[in-house]
Image (tube, coloured by chain):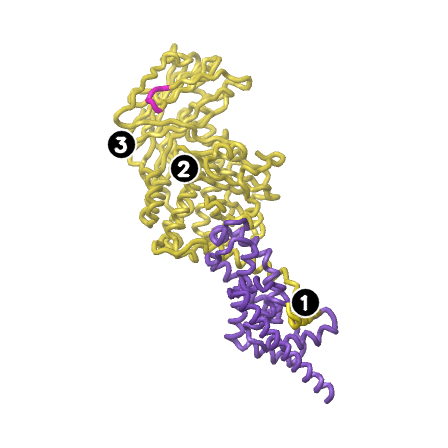
Amino acid sequence: MSSAQPASRILGDPAAFVRLYRSSYDVIFRYCVHRLFDRHTAEDMTSEVFLKAARHAHRFEGLDETQFRNWLYRVATNEINTHIRKTTRRERLLRFFGQGPDRDVSVRNETDTDDLERLKKAVLALKPGYQAVITLRFTENLTHNEIAGVLDVSPGTVRSRLSRAVAELRARLRTADEKGRREVIR
Amino acid sequence: MSEHEEQMKNLFNNIRFDDTPDARHRDALEKQLLGVLAGSGRQPSANAEIWRTIMTSRFVKVAAVMALVAVAGILISRTGTPENPSTVSILASARAAEASLFRSTGVVHIVSEMTLYPGGPDTAKLLKELESSPTYENNVALLKSWISQQWVPLCSLDADGETVWNKIEVTQSGTEPVKVIDAVWYESSSGRFVRTLEMDKHVLFANAYDGQAIYLAQKGADGKLNVVRTPISSKFKVPANPADFMGIAAGVKGPQSTMHFPPIQEATSGTLPDGTKARIYKLGFVDLFGKLDTYFLFRISAETDIMNEIECVVGGKTTRLQKRVAAETVAQPELAWDLANLPKDTPASEGPTARTGKGAWTVSIAEMTEQATFPVYVFATQPSWVKKVQVFNLPDETDPASRMFAVAYVAGDGRDMVLTQTRALTRYFGAMLKGAQGHEDQIPWVYVSTNGFRVIHQKDTQTEMWWTELALKSSGFSPSANRVGYILMAPDSSFLVLAINGPVSDDELHGLVDSLIPAAEYVPQAGQP
């Protein structure tokens, strides 16, 4: 996207939108996977994000590709949070994880499996807002300022929200570790 | 980054998700997105019944897409295997018979009378009205106007010996028909000729050859005739059959040497004004409703095989009648072979006026680019099934200063294509879309290409069959049962229509549309224009 060609450019030029889609798809899909730990749901969510973006491209007021990506992140975050809140997906995911290994998200080696399971449970137990800031910061590697842009809050809010989310996640991971050790002892 | 954040980052970094995207999902979503984008380009407005009407109305369904294609198609002729040999054979024999008139010794003087009947609508004005107010009524009025538009083709000879297509337009303010006298003097021994068109005893147009140069006289804006002398080139040859550019049927032939007319619908017998027997042929296309109210009537002498009359009927009303009124031998032409004594002072009459200009001719893609005053597109690479490409430059009735271009792709497997583009198409479909605001979801967009073209496919078999048949048949192609037609909206919001004479897969269609480029960027391939 060239400079000074905001939403109207995308809206009036499907080819431009397609180019942006192609350059953004992987980023958004990965974000959805990292948020949801479920490839199929992540694909559905990715579809929702881009379809929504296409339908509401006129709402995008940014000027460059980075701003467009951040806008997509925001759309995705809202979609995922809404998805989690409005459905029982979160609980079902937790139950699913309790029943056995994830069939959709695999890890690269056996050592990672336990860590992934532990992390999934801990992250998915967080409030959606905390999940978002954790994922954006640690898997998407966005800066505080970028996260602030995505979530439409101040960088200070991001820092405090991230601090609380990290603290809660650490606590949950510690709890999971202790529970795991007890299970091993029994 | 705090210590806890650092630890957390390391934790996430040490877990490597298998988060590789699935290309199949990515591609499927892209197609879905293109569909959404195609239908969401404009904001809703209150004025918007027209497109829905187009899609549901029996009459407008035809016309929504077809008027211009039909007009273009009727005028286009293409060399190749005649689809309608009976028509061609009749015309060929009439042409041969007419040639005999010009072979007489001395100076042959042939006079034809062309009667133009009033009542033709003002297409340009109606298009403007549709643009400002895209209502159903205005749309129907425009389409009827397009269908009944008339300009009279007129052939002349240039300094290379090639036939040039001119057009003569007559503006009629009254209710009386206008008569134009077409007078020819021809000397078979030298090939010298003089031809004039007169109205109200004023010469409108003249073309002559004196053995050394070609003379062309046309009425200028000042109301006077301007005579241009062009010495013949080294390529110049006296035409073997002067009837090809001065005969009665020359004006209704295609821009190519091979005639291609609509099929013969009726063959009857009758008499000519002098009482001699005649064969009468009705040539036309049956419309979508099974109606044949727009056609040519050829009246051919049963004794001489010479075509004596051509009548053009549009919507059941005669719009033009050409008939031969004299064919004799004279000692000298009334005008000098070099038009030296041509009366140049031809004041505009109070009543009808006439304007002549260039009609239709074939061009290269590069020439199309130069001559077009609007964006024109071609396929960057011809699909494998295309063997030959021809481009026709045609008049645009809605804008005399503009042109219409039809790119005919001759296929090796029967899947011929005709790509038509003109400013009027853009204005027309632009008005249609304006009228459809708020109902975009009813427009049958089927594809948005990566280069920004949006494609409408009116998947109504009857409608699609009707206009694609007309476009293809008129272009010299034999329509197949599974032909298809698409309306294309370019990234610059201009419109094109594409008729394809056979089935194309989604991939083939997408490949075609994806390959559309501005004609200015076209790099000719071997054997292509």
Q: Nearer the viewer, residue B20 or B139?
A: B20
**Residue type, mark 3 in image:** Ser
Say left or right for B361 vs B282.
Answer: right
* Residue B28: assigned label: none
Task: Check the image and report above or below for A29 versus B230.
Answer: below
Image coords of residue B132 (percent x, y): 34, 45
Chain letter for mark 3, please: B
* Residue B18: assigned label: 1
> Which chain did the image draw in yellow?
B
Residue B67 seen from this side:
yes
Q: Which type of secondary structure does the marked residue at label 3 adopt?
A: loop
The picture's colour for chain A is: purple
Q: Which stretch appears magenta?
A: B221-225
Q: Which residue is mark 3?
A: B173
Image coords of residue B405 (percent x, y): 47, 37
Q: Which residue is mark 2?
A: B283
Camera-near label (1 vs 2) is 1
**Residue type, mark 2 in image:** Leu
Tell me the crowding category of disc 2: few under 14, some 14 to 19, or many 20 or more residues within 10 angstroms, Cα based: many
**Residue type, mark 1 in image:** Asp
